[in-house]
Amino acid sequence: MKLYRRLLAYAGPYWRLALAASLSFVLSGFLGAYPIQLFKRAVDIAAGDTAPVAIGVAEALARLAVQYIGLRVALGGIQLAEAYLSRRLTQSVIFDLRSDLYAHLQSLSIGFHETRGAGDIISRALGDVGALAGGVMGPLTRLAGELTQLAWALAFLVSINPVLTLVALAIAPPLGYAVYKFGDKMHGQSWKMRLAQSALWSFLMQNIAGIREIKIFGRETHELARFRARAAEIDEIGLKDATLNATLTFFTGLLFSAGETAILLLGGLALYRGSMTAGMLTAFLMYVRMLYNPVITLSRRYDQMQRTLASAVRVFEVLDTEPEISDAPDALDLHNAAGAIRLEHVDFSYEEGREVLHDITFDVAPGEMIALVGHSGGGKTTLSKLVPRFYDPCAGRILLDGVDLRDISIASLRSHIAVVFQEAFLFQGTLRENLRYGRQDATEDEMLAASEAANVHAFALELTDGYDTVIGERGMKLSGGQRQRVAIGRALLKNPRILVLDEATSSVDSETERLIQDALDTLLANRTSIVIAHRLSTVLHADQILVVEGGRIVERGIHTDLIAAGGVYAQLHAAQYEDAESSRQEAGSSHQHPRTP
């Protein structure tokens, strides 16, 4: 019930719409029940079971027919209004719920998104919220009409024959028990179904994103088998759910048939004895059907609502998740940052018992460049995530201009920071939209200046529509180096005080690296920067180089001092130099002695 109350709370702002819809359902329920009274009178007039009519039988029946047509026309108009009102109410509630869910997803910390699959999140935002529209809000908006129809049918039944009404209601206890027991089982199946569908959604998203790898490694058959296994699981769950639903329908059908048979027998006996007229028995049987139909509908509504209850649980589970990173109540707005960064004895773990960083301490003066180097898995990227407060330290603190980051509002902190990741993410849209993503109010001249500084302008002019070229999902119409330069141009246009670079040139060729490095030199000028570098040649002139191994800073200094020390940094530098020399020798050998095909 708590979930239903939370859903109904979303209808609060639309109470006038909800009231109008409820009134239309109530009126519809009455207009749907009253015409049976006309049938009762018509049958009694035709059978001669009423007092003679002064206007004649034919004219009396004709008048009843006109009344019936008028009621049906009015009913049609009311049903049209109720369909519109209920749909509008449902869509308004679902729109607000989906908007709140998306806004909350945006507020959740990076940790939430990194531990949850994108398919699971999308499944909740689209599939589960959509299921609530048809499975919960729809039935709830129609509930007033079905209950009204049930009440009118019951009132007319009592007015015709109270004893037979009790016979008609005798099936209520076993029916309620059946709906309750089957509904509980259906809820369990529905929960399994939503989890299986979410898993399949995640699988499809991953495989579509990795279609190149699937093809190049010839794994199509393997992935098809994995897909079929997941789809078969959904089919099995759906079959069990359908079986439960069919069994419930069969059982309720038997109960209704038993009730109608008893009424037919007892009503026929009353007709034979003269205690009921033909019109009364006809009307009674029609009202019994009207009584049973809402019961059937309500039981199915209950089944439907139980099946979508799993979706409500999954939606509110996300809405109830508290952001791990949030503003302090008295957080400061940072307007003009000098860019001095200090880490004091910082420890960090993604999960308890597995420390990633330990006792990290260093300073970066305004405008300085600090480089983080070391073997993969040492904790460098994790360090870069702490500066923009994607995560908070488990111990120690990080200061910006002497103020703890946790005392600065997140929005103002990140307005002074730009990050260029190892794999640049671009959005579906035009090149211009991606460049201006971090600064929507940038002028055309500012955008072009940033583009030229990032070595984007030259290739932009070669595109079909220049800066208005749609670059595809994730920017796939551009090369890796071009995407990286766009990301740098985007950061340049934002004009941040602090810059974080996460191996921005690690996966490009030497010519592209030169272009990117030229763009980075422009981007780094006069900015406080933290650079994670795989290629040590890109950080030779850093103001300070930190060697991070096993989550600790094991060496620190400038390039020449670290080389002279002969430690880890010197070993990394020697290994990269040897690799580069070997590559040059192989290239020269291939040039002198080309291979034959």
Image (cartoon, rainbow, N blue to C red):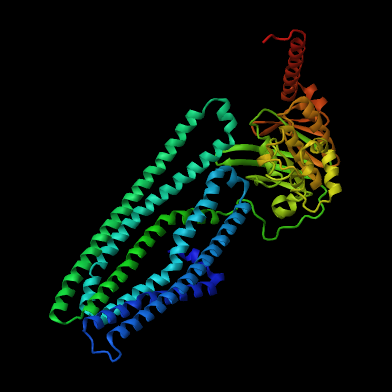
Vertical relation: 262 (above or below) 307: below
Quick one: quadrant of the C terminus? top right
Residue 286 image point, x, y percent: 28, 72
Residue 409 image point, x, y percent: 71, 55
Horizontally, residue 444 falls left or right of residue 54, namely right
Vertical relation: 335 (above or below) 47: above
Residue 9 image point, x, y percent: 52, 67
Q: Quadrant of residue 58?
A: bottom left
- What residue is rendered at 24% in x and 71% in y? 168
- What residue is rendered at 24% in x and 63% in y? 255
Residue 10 in sight here = no
Q: Quadrant of residue 509?
A: top right
Vertical relation: 420 (above or below) 11: above
Number of callouts: 0
Vertical relation: 67 (above or below) 204: below
Horizontally, residue 82 falls left or right of residue 290, namely right
